[in-house]
Amino acid sequence: MERGLRVTPEAKKQIRDANAWWVANRSAAPHLIRTELERAFLLITSQPRVGSPALDPDLDPVRRILLYRIGYHLYYRIALDSTVHVLGLWHTSRGVAPPL
Protein backbone atom coordinates (compact mmCIF):
# COMPACT_ATOMS: atom_id res chain seq x y z
CA MET A 1 0.00 0.00 0.00
CA GLU A 2 1.46 3.33 -1.03
CA ARG A 3 1.05 6.18 1.42
CA GLY A 4 1.08 9.93 0.98
CA LEU A 5 4.37 11.80 1.13
CA ARG A 6 5.05 15.23 2.58
CA VAL A 7 8.45 16.93 2.49
CA THR A 8 8.99 19.61 5.13
CA PRO A 9 10.32 23.03 4.10
CA GLU A 10 13.64 22.35 5.88
CA ALA A 11 14.03 19.01 4.08
CA LYS A 12 13.24 20.70 0.75
CA LYS A 13 16.00 23.22 1.42
CA GLN A 14 18.47 20.48 2.36
CA ILE A 15 17.56 18.56 -0.79
CA ARG A 16 17.94 21.65 -3.00
CA ASP A 17 21.32 22.51 -1.43
CA ALA A 18 22.62 18.95 -1.74
CA ASN A 19 21.42 18.68 -5.32
CA ALA A 20 23.01 21.99 -6.33
CA TRP A 21 26.34 20.92 -4.83
CA TRP A 22 26.11 17.50 -6.45
CA VAL A 23 25.33 18.83 -9.93
CA ALA A 24 28.23 21.29 -9.70
CA ASN A 25 30.75 18.78 -8.33
CA ARG A 26 29.81 15.34 -9.64
CA SER A 27 29.85 15.71 -13.41
CA ALA A 28 30.00 11.94 -13.99
CA ALA A 29 26.57 11.46 -12.40
CA PRO A 30 24.93 14.87 -11.99
CA HIS A 31 21.40 13.49 -11.55
CA LEU A 32 22.22 10.75 -9.04
CA ILE A 33 20.75 12.58 -6.04
CA ARG A 34 17.45 13.03 -7.85
CA THR A 35 17.42 9.37 -8.91
CA GLU A 36 18.25 8.11 -5.43
CA LEU A 37 15.64 10.33 -3.78
CA GLU A 38 12.95 9.17 -6.21
CA ARG A 39 13.79 5.56 -5.35
CA ALA A 40 13.85 6.33 -1.63
CA PHE A 41 10.49 8.12 -1.75
CA LEU A 42 8.91 5.13 -3.49
CA LEU A 43 10.43 2.78 -0.93
CA ILE A 44 9.38 4.67 2.20
CA THR A 45 5.84 5.23 0.94
CA SER A 46 5.37 1.56 0.11
CA GLN A 47 7.30 0.16 3.10
CA PRO A 48 7.56 2.95 5.70
CA ARG A 49 9.09 0.78 8.41
CA VAL A 50 12.04 -0.13 6.17
CA GLY A 51 14.20 2.55 7.78
CA SER A 52 16.06 2.11 11.04
CA PRO A 53 15.16 4.19 14.07
CA ALA A 54 17.38 7.27 14.23
CA LEU A 55 20.29 6.79 16.62
CA ASP A 56 19.62 9.99 18.57
CA PRO A 57 17.00 9.27 21.27
CA ASP A 58 15.78 12.87 20.99
CA LEU A 59 14.63 12.06 17.45
CA ASP A 60 12.27 9.23 18.42
CA PRO A 61 10.12 8.15 16.47
CA VAL A 62 12.16 9.36 13.51
CA ARG A 63 13.46 6.74 11.09
CA ARG A 64 16.24 6.96 8.53
CA ILE A 65 17.47 5.13 5.48
CA LEU A 66 20.94 5.22 4.03
CA LEU A 67 21.23 6.33 0.42
CA TYR A 68 24.60 4.65 0.10
CA ARG A 69 25.29 5.65 -3.51
CA ILE A 70 25.31 9.32 -2.51
CA GLY A 71 26.36 9.07 1.15
CA TYR A 72 23.26 10.63 2.71
CA HIS A 73 20.70 9.60 5.30
CA LEU A 74 17.07 10.44 4.60
CA TYR A 75 15.18 11.12 7.84
CA TYR A 76 11.42 10.68 8.02
CA ARG A 77 8.50 10.08 10.35
CA ILE A 78 5.28 8.14 9.86
CA ALA A 79 2.26 10.22 10.87
CA LEU A 80 -0.82 8.81 12.57
CA ASP A 81 -2.68 8.94 9.25
CA SER A 82 0.18 6.88 7.68
CA THR A 83 1.49 9.82 5.66
CA VAL A 84 5.29 9.75 5.46
CA HIS A 85 6.88 13.08 6.42
CA VAL A 86 10.40 13.60 5.09
CA LEU A 87 12.25 15.65 7.69
CA GLY A 88 15.78 15.93 6.39
CA LEU A 89 18.60 14.86 4.12
CA TRP A 90 21.92 14.73 5.95
CA HIS A 91 25.35 13.66 4.75
CA THR A 92 26.88 10.75 6.64
CA SER A 93 30.19 12.56 7.10
CA ARG A 94 28.64 15.16 9.41
CA GLY A 95 29.40 14.44 13.03
CA VAL A 96 26.19 15.85 14.47
CA ALA A 97 22.54 14.95 14.23
CA PRO A 98 20.47 16.87 11.69
CA PRO A 99 18.37 19.85 12.80
CA LEU A 100 14.95 18.26 12.58
Image (cartoon, grey):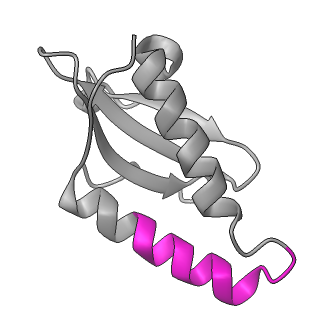
- Give the total of numbered labels: 0
Q: Residue 10's quadrant in the figure?
A: bottom left
Residue shown at 76%/50% (left/top)? 69
- Taking depth in this image into account, of 14 and 93 the one nearest to the observer is 14
Residue segment shown in magenta:
15-28
Q: Is residue 12 above or below residue 52?
A: below
- Taking depth in this image into account, of 9 and 72 the one nearest to the observer is 9
Tell me residue 72's x, y (percent): 59, 51
Residue shown at 55%/49% (left/top)? 37
Task: In the displayed orientation, state which residue is furthest to the right.
Answer: 28
Does residue 65 appear anywhere in the picture? yes
Q: Is residue 73 magenta?
A: no
> Looking at the rendering, in which quadrant would you find the N terminus?
top left
Task: In the displayed orientation, state which residue is furthest to the bottom.
Answer: 24
Tell me residue 49's x, y (percent): 44, 12
Task: In the displayed orientation, state which residue is furthest to the front.
Answer: 1
Q: Residue 93's quadrant in the figure?
A: bottom right
Magenta stretch: dominant secondary structure: helix
Does residue 53 appear anywhere in the picture? no
Q: Is residue 6 above or below residue 32?
A: above
Residue shown at 46%/32% (left/top)? 64
Residue shown at 26%/29% (left/top)? 4
Tell me residue 46's x, y (percent): 46, 18
Tell me residue 61's x, y (percent): 26, 20
